[in-house]
Image (cartoon, rainbow, N blue to C red):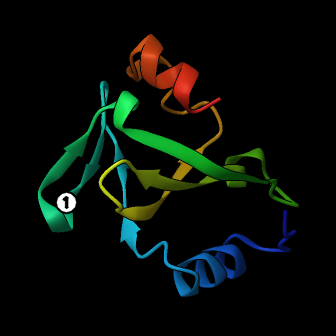
Amino acid sequence: MKNYDTLSEAINDLQANGYTYNFNLKPKCLECASLKLQISPEDFDVDKTYRFEGMSSTDDNSILYAISSKNGIKGLLVDAYGVYAENISETMRKKLR
């Protein structure tokens, strides 16, 4: 797995490699607003996970997920460490571990 120094570097490289859509985390699914599509946990796979830790503040911590859906849509989900942990279903939590 490739290592990246910054979140923006990772996003740019993954987008160049086909992860072109942006996903939003919902309580029971991922949402792709540009396609007006919701993807259930059983319909996507997490291909790669990258963790980034801020140098000066723990508020800068984030996780980047490279995700592929069963219907061929590839995109990215950026999540802050622990921010959404209480707002998602157990199924979503397990899928994103």
Q: Position of residue 20 (x, y in %)?
A: 42, 76
Compared with 73, 45 (above or below) is above
Instruction: Tell which of 55 and 25 is nearer to you.
Output: 25
Density class for disc 1 (Cα within 10 Å; few <14, some 14-19, many ≥20) is: few
Q: Position of residue 25 (x, y in %)?
A: 37, 41
Compared with 40, 62 (above or below) is below
| Residue 26 placement, left or right of 48 | left
Q: Position of residue 78 (x, y in %)?
A: 53, 55
Q: Residue at x 69, y 70 (%)?
A: 7
Residue type of the residue flagged with mark 1: Ala
Compared with 46, 55 (above or below) is below
Instruction: Tell which of 74 and 29 is nearer to you.
Output: 74
Element under disc 1: helix
- Quadrant where the image shows the N terminus: bottom right
Looking at the image, can residue 63 be seen? no
Which residue does the numbered mark 1 point to in the structure image? 33
